[in-house]
Amino acid sequence: MKNIIKQLGLLALIGLIAIGCEKSPVSHGGDHTDTDGFILKDENGNGLYREFKGAIEINNVNLIVGDTLELSVHFLDHEGDEIQHGEDEEDHEDELIITGNDTSIAIIEVEKHEEGENDHEGEEEHYEIAIHIIGISAGSSSFKLELMHGDHADYTSINNVSFNVTELY
């Protein structure tokens, strides 16, 4: 009987922890990005890196020393489709954090910007998160990507995003 009570107590505690994120007074807003992956796209819309449900499906991030590679970050839902991030005001509170990069190979900067103006007819405001990878010296490096919502990560990449920086010959 004591064992059953302990198990029920443990289940109740796990349930409270699971729903605690949405009820947390420290988090900003109530909406969280529920994602199973992400894709990094270049300025032309080509997917250079894609991670979905832990599997790396595309990995083609390369740049030359001295160049800057601008990549937009698009999060993926449970079906692998892009989430329309930025439609809600709460999305503007999300922050992308990059960790684990070797800064002697490349510097990675995070940029949040809005495109379009609400006051132009037919144009909607578009909110985008982008990263800039600036090649410093030849070599390989990698980084982790985290989408922060307040004091916690809504999403953390399962794999490190690897990339190569080469010399121009």
Image: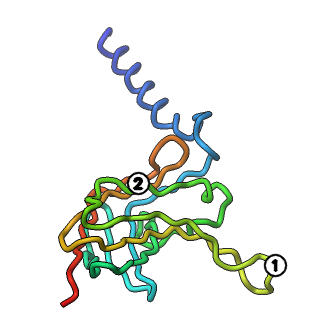
Q: Quadrant of residue 91?
A: bottom right
Q: Quadrant of the C terminus?
A: bottom left
Where is residue 27 shown, x and y percent of the image? 58, 40
- The answer to whether the residue labelled 1 contacts the one labelled 2, judged by CB atoms less than 8 Å apart, is no
Where is residue 17 shown, x and y percent of the image? 46, 32
Extreme residue toward the top, this view: 2
Seen at 18% across and 71% down, the residue is 139
Q: Quadrant of the N terminus?
A: top left
> What distance separates the C-alpha of mark 1 from that of mark 2?
33 Å
Seen at 46% across and 50% down, the residue is 154
Q: Which mark is residue 91?
A: none
Apparent side of residue 20 relative to residue 109 in the rendered image (left or right): right
Q: Give the residue type that dot 2 points to.
A: Glu
| Residue named by callout 2 | 146
Q: Quadrant of residue 46?
A: bottom left
Indicate the secondary structure of the residue bearing disc 1.
loop
Q: Is residue 72 above or below residue 161?
A: below
Pointer 1: residues within 10 angstroms few (<14), some, or many (20+)?
few
Q: Is residue 103 above or below residue 49?
A: above
Indicate the secondary structure of the residue bearing disc 2.
strand
Question: In this orientation, which residue lies closer to the viewer: 26 or 140?
Answer: 140
Where is residue 166 shown, x and y percent of the image? 21, 80
Q: Give the residue type that dot 1 points to.
A: Asp
| Residue named by callout 1 | 119
Q: Is residue 73 above or below residue 156?
A: below
Apparent side of residue 38 relative to residue 55 in the rendered image (left or right): right
First-in-chain label (1 vs 2): 1
Seen at 19% across and 69% down, the residue is 140
Q: Is residue 82 above or below residue 96?
A: below
